[in-house]
Amino acid sequence: MRVKSSSAIPAIGARAVKPRAAFARRLLSAINGWFERRRVLAELASLDDRSLADLQITRSDFHRIASGEYRRHRMGDRDAI
């Protein structure tokens, strides 16, 4: 019995490694992002109400701040809402 050239086997394996590596990078990035958001939330939760008022943020802003969706209002804009 004749065996086909094994040169195609490493090529298939090499192509399979790239998607796996990309998936691993995306997964690690997502996990790191989750830990960073948890760290930011814990730090914000440790602030007292006076500190939050000085920063012009409320506890309801925490998740938007941690996810990067929060945009600071200019002075007076918050009163108009």
Image (cartoon, rainbow, N blue to C red):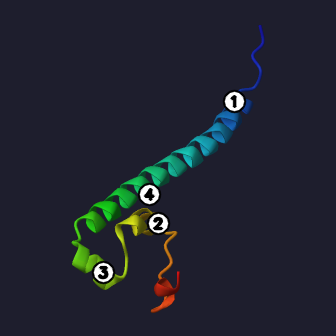
Residue 9 - label: 1
Q: Nearer the viewer, residue 5 or 72?
A: 72
Q: Give the labeled residue for mark 2.
A: 64
Q: Nearer the viewer, mark 2 or mark 4?
A: 2
| Residue for point 75% across, 26% down | 5
Q: Identify residue type, mark 4.
A: Gly
Label 2, secondary structure: give it: helix
Name the residue furthest front.
80
Q: Measure the alpha-carbon separation of dots 2 and 3.
A: 17 Å
Identify the image quadrant of residue 34. bottom left
Pointer 2 or 3: first along the chain: 3
Q: Position of residue 30 (x, y in %)?
A: 48, 52
Residue shown at the point (64%, 37%) measured from the top left:
16
**Residue 47, image x, y percentages:** 23, 71
Horizontal side, residue 12 vs residue 80: left or right: right
In three-dimensional space, the C-alpha distance between marks 2 and 4, rounded to whole angstroms, equals: 14 Å
Residue 53 vs 4, above or below: the answer is below
Mark 2, other Cα within 10 Å: few <14 / some 14–19 / many ≥20: few
Whether tag 1 and tag 4 are in contact, CB under 8 A, the answer is no
The residue carrying mark 4 is 33
Secondary structure of the residue carrying tag 1 is helix
Distance from the alpha carbon under mark 2 to that under mark 1: 48 Å
Q: Nearer the viewer, mark 1 or mark 4?
A: 4
Number of the front mark, 2 or 3:
3
Residue type highlighted by circle 1: Ile
Q: Earlier in the sequence, mark 1 or mark 4?
A: 1
Image marks 1 and 3: residues in contact by CB distance under 8 Å: no
Q: In screen coordinates, is 45 left or right of 73?
A: left
